Amino acid sequence: MGLGQPSPGQLGQRAVVAGAERWPPVASTSPSCPSPSPDYAWAFYVFWLNPHEVCWCSKHKLKSLGGLRGPRVRALAMLEARWKVLSDLLVELRSRGADVPAEVVRDLRLSRSLIEAMRASPGHPELEAKAEELMLGVEAYLLAEAEVRLGPDRAEEWGRRLEEASLEAALGPAEVRFRPGLPRDRHWVRVKVSEDLPMDLLRQLASEEGVSAELQQDGFLLVSGDEGKVKAFIRRLAKHIRGQA
């Protein structure tokens, strides 16, 4: 799973695309986000760093994105991404013989209609709230059914897919830089300390997951450690970000 390889046109514009909407290009003033590059890396996890930059990493590689979606565009994109994962999960459960109640299928379809209404008629928070309510109910049922039909490990994997889809949906095309000073086998991520992601929270999560956390001069916290522990930290942070969206 990854964000997908951006087209040359998207890189040149530094644009984030959500359906028919195009978020205006944002020029980055960060030294970690130079001119667009045709070089790409792939990773599972991504993070907001500040209103004009996003970074994600795979081992020693750093990705800096030139724009972050606004709240309305982000909310719509995240709902769409979660809906797609839930739809895929429904298909898999039915292929395993699950008899999903008609009201669950109805709620999933209705949530899709609400998402389309949000796209056609922006500025109606009640549509987003209702779609979120319906999808949470569908998600709870399908994940519980997945644990029975597919087993706990597979159900947990679907839960991770939902988290990752929500987070990835907020982001757009990227470019790559190498991160010096760390062993090649050490996994890491840099997170911007902010009001939404305060130092106390980040250090607490890092401590609980057993990874190191070093504050750097540019205001970023460098979190590094074993692959599994860094990914556990990332999942905890993803849940926090999703709760704020």
Image: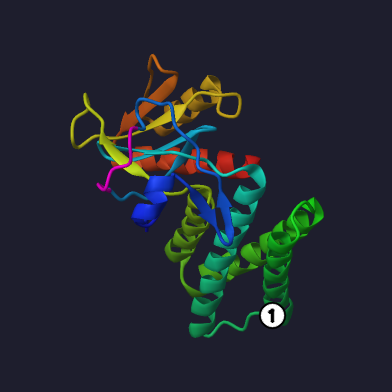
> Would you say the magenta stretch is mainly helix, strand or loop?
loop
Image point (50%, 42%), residue name: 25
Image point (55%, 44%), residue name: 24
The quadrant in which residue 220 appears is: top left
Q: Check disc 1: other Cα within 10 Å, few if <14, some if 14-19, many if 20+.
A: few
* Residue 35 falls within the magenta-colored stretch: yes
Q: Position of residue 62 (x, y in %)?
A: 31, 36
- Eyeballing the image, is 43 above or below 144? above
Quarter that holds the C terminus: top right
Q: Position of residue 101 (x, y in %)?
A: 69, 80
Position of 6 with respect to 186 (left or right) is: right
Image point (38%, 46%), residue name: 12
| Residue matched to label 1 | 101
Q: Position of residue 240 (x, y in %)?
A: 57, 39
- Eyeballing the image, is 58 above or below 32? below
Number of marks: 1
In the structure shown, which secondary structural element does the residue marked by tag 1 occupy? Answer: loop
Position of 23 with respect to 234 (left or right) is: right
Magenta region, residue range: 34-40
Q: Is residue 134 visible?
A: no
- Eyeballing the image, is 174 above or below 109? above
* Residue 189 falls within the magenta-colored stretch: no
Image point (54%, 53%), residue name: 166
